[in-house]
Structure formats: C-alpha cells, structure tokens
Amino acid sequence: MNWDWTVIWENIPKLMDGALLTLELVLFSGLIGVLLAIPLALLRVSNNIWVRALPYAYIFFFRGTPLLIQIFLVYYGASQFEWIKESSLWPILREPYWCAVITFGLHTAAYIAELLRGAIQSIPKGEIEAAKALGMSYPKMLRRITLPRAFGIMMPSYGNEVILMLKGSALASTITLLDLTGMARTIIARTYTPLEIFLAAGVMYLIISALIIFLFRMLERYFNRHQHWPNEKPKGLDSQLLSKD
Amino acid sequence: MNLKHALAGVAVVAATLTAPFSMAADKIRIATEGAYAPFNYIDESGELKGFDVDIAKALCEEMKADCTIVAQDWDGIIPGLMARKYDAIIASMSITPERSRVVDFTDPYYSNSLIFVAPKKSKFSPEKVSGKAIGAQRATIAGQYLEDNLGDKVSVKLYDTQDNAYLDLASGRLDAIVSDQLPAYDWLRSDAGQAFEFKGEKIDIDDKIGIAVRKNDKLRQKMNKALKAILENGTYDRINAQYFPFSIY
C-alpha cells in the first residue's frame, strides 16, 4: 500500500466544486422541505381524521421507502411517460439537478413535518390557552406562538435531519450529478486511488457537518432566547415587568 | 472387523478429510459486473450469464479449478481485487496503462472499439457534437474517451451502469452516447434499442480486453495457458458464435 498525498492536493479544487454542489442541494432541498413541512404538520395535528389522512399518507410513503428508490423514480421513472415528456414540466424534470432538489425536498419534508408535529403537540397547553385567552386569531397565534415555540422545540432534531440530508445527498451522484461523492468517484475512475480521494471527500463532509452543527446551535439560541433570560432581556416589554421585586 | 478392513476404513476417512484441502488450492473467485449485456448480465432467475461468464467457466474447466463467480459494481471492481475479495476480474475490462499500474493483465481475450449511438430520427453526427449532451458509463474507456476528446465541447454525463445511460438516451436527456461497439450492437437488436442506430464510423482505439489479476499473481500464467488452449481447441469459437455472427477476438 503506497499512500499518494499528491493525488489529494491535485484534486482539491475539483472536490471543492463538488462540495459546493452538495451544499447547494442541501440548502435548496432544505428550504423546500421546511416550506412544505409547515402545512403538512398543521394538517397532521388536525382533529379531523380526513384532514389528517393526506399528510399521514405522504409522510408514510416518504419515510417508508429508500431515498435511492425515490430519486430513481423521479429521474428515470418520470422520463418513461410520453405525457410527462411533452408537458411543461419536462424542461425542469429533464435536468438531473432539479430532479435531485425536488426528490430531496419532498423526502426531507416528510421527516421535518413529523418533527414539527411532535413539537407542536409538546407545546405546553397553557401557552396555547393563554394565546386564546388574549383573543389571538388562529393565524396570529400560529405566527406569534405556535410556530416559533415549535421551531425552538424541534431545532436540535431538525439539525440532525439536515445532517442526514447532507449524507443522503451523496445519492445525487447516481443521476450523473458531480456532487462531492460524484466528483470523488469520477476522480477515482481515473486515478484508482479510492482510499486517498474518499478520505479527502470524507473530511470535507465532516467540515460541512461541523458548520451545520454550529449554525443550528445559533438558531437554537435564537428560537429559545426566552430561556436564556436574564442574560438577554426581552425587547419591547414594559420596564416595570423586568424589575426584580 | 479385521485389521485390513480397519486400515481401509482409516484410508477412506483420510481421503475424504484431505480431499477438500487439496482442492482448496485450486479455488478461484472471479468477479464480473453483471450489468453489461451480452458480456455479463444477470438473467431472470438471478444467475450470471454472458460471454465473459462463459469464457470464465471454460477457463476454469481448462485449469480444472473450482470457481465461484460473483457480481461486483463496476467502479469498485479493481479496489475489490486489490482487497483480495476475489482473485480475477473477467468483466470485459480494457487493458489500459492506468489500470496496468495497479493490476496485471492476461493476454487479450477479445478486442473492442467505440461508437456513437443516437436515435434513428436524430440528425446527430460525430462531426458536429458541440453543445450536445453525450453520455457514457463512468470509469470506462468510453467515459475517458469522452472526457479527453470532447470534454470541452459537449456536456459529459457519466452513469453508474450502461443500462442507465441507455435509459437516459431513450428519455431524450442525452443526444447520443459513446459506447463500446459490441454491447451496443446487442442492445440495438433488443426491443428497447429499436429506435436507435450507430452514428458515424466506429472509433478504433486499439482497445484490447483482458483478465485482471493482482500484481505478480501466478494465476496470470495459468490463465494465459488456459486461454491459449480454449482458443486452439475451438471452445472459444463456439462461445463467440453464441453471441456474435463474426469473430470478436
């Protein structure tokens, strides 16, 4: 076994390009995921079984099937149908990039929705009752109380989900995308140095994970800032309420 | 029971005990890909079939070896050999200088050239490729040819298997693929390949296909001897005729 450091240095720029694409995929799919997850989770906590059924089926499907199958279904599956190829969706679906973003977005939305549902249901009843007692409308209560509280509660596990998605994004390499994994595999196909290049790629994934963990620490502090009082004083509150006695 | 019978009994037991050990010396594990019809593929019953597999079996018979043939994903096939997961690769692998740095090759057992495949109704021509999307399998001669010769003119798409490249040619995401000529010949004859044809002349790249073994493994000489034998005794021609109406050696 002779270890080849030069092959790593030579290919760092290419791997960086791949890492950039990986970051993009995680970011865009994460955005789609959160936007979809909010309505899904709100429907999911409904008391009406028929309203609950649709998000339940969605979550059941996306959590119960492998991401690889989902990405193959979207990328190779959709292209089997003539009517999809003739529809206005085709310019988007023919691009592997958008297939990956859409699949990852739909996939992570299912997980985030389930996290958000758990968070909404674990908000102390008293807080919701207080909001109602103050006469808040449903949208206002969502905006001011329910969602901010739920985000605070779910933030640690959501960070976890983003890291899982980061690793799942390696599957983009199966549909011709040159993400970090795809780039590493393409380099290895030439140099036959799997250990060196996969080690370099692995280190890059670690660095990205560390950045994500750090980012979510910050977000957690932001959403749960009321718990850090009195280090951070709430803004816009009557100063008399803040006096110690 | 007299002494003579007892001794005979001991001999039988000894023979049955040692038999597996003496055979173990000739146990050879061979890897192929299983996604490269008609050379190696997995049939409906889940068995490995194809030209490579038939050649492997003929060689094993010639060497009187006990062989197991396993399927292994293409881009991990050389690392697997080096990690001693198997002893030889008979998977239509081209002999290249890059590969020869890490593995040893036997004498070639067939030769191959590259060719463009595109839809019959498309006006695609290998002379005018600028801006086109062209696919090939990752970590193959076709993939390297594409990257080296057309990498700056076309959008290169690399696939994990040849089958996935065909799927995307059929979906219209690709304008053409560059492929090894012989498997493409086989695909064009299949139902899925009816709407496609070869475009332009075949690209001769002096592509010889060999069997890969670990560096300095004595298996190489044994394989070469067996290969020579099946070429001389007609076994090779018989296998060739099952797949192609012309000689591919």
Image: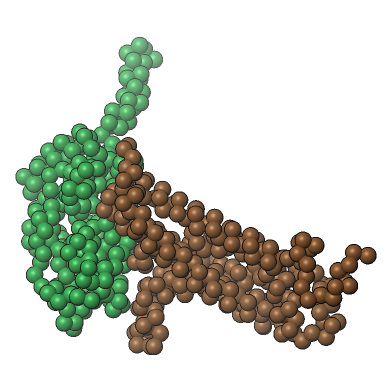
**Which residue shows up at 18% across the image and 72% down it?**
B117
Q: Give the colour in which the image draws chain A.
A: brown
Residue A30 is left or right of residue B38, and the answer is right
Which quarter of the picture shows residue B85? Answer: top left
In the figure, residue A149 lies in which quadrant?
A: bottom right
Please name the color used to draw chain B: green
**Residue A237, image x, y percentages:** 81, 75
Which of the image's four quarters has the C terminus of chain A?
A: bottom right
Task: Please name whichever residue, A93 or B241, is drawn nearer the observer in this view of the structure.
Answer: A93
Q: Position of residue B129 (x, y in %)?
A: 18, 75
Residue B196 visible, this orientation: no
Task: Name the foreground residue: A106 vs A47.
Answer: A106
Q: Residue at x 23, y 76 (%)?
A: B131
Does residue B2 sit above or below B228 in this rendering?
A: above
Residue B91 appears in the figure: yes
Q: Is residue A209 above or below residue B192?
A: above
Location of residue B246 in the rendering, given as x and y in whole percent from the top left corner: 7, 61
* Residue at x-position 63% and y-position 62%: A218
Q: Depth check: A83 or A145 in front?
A: A145
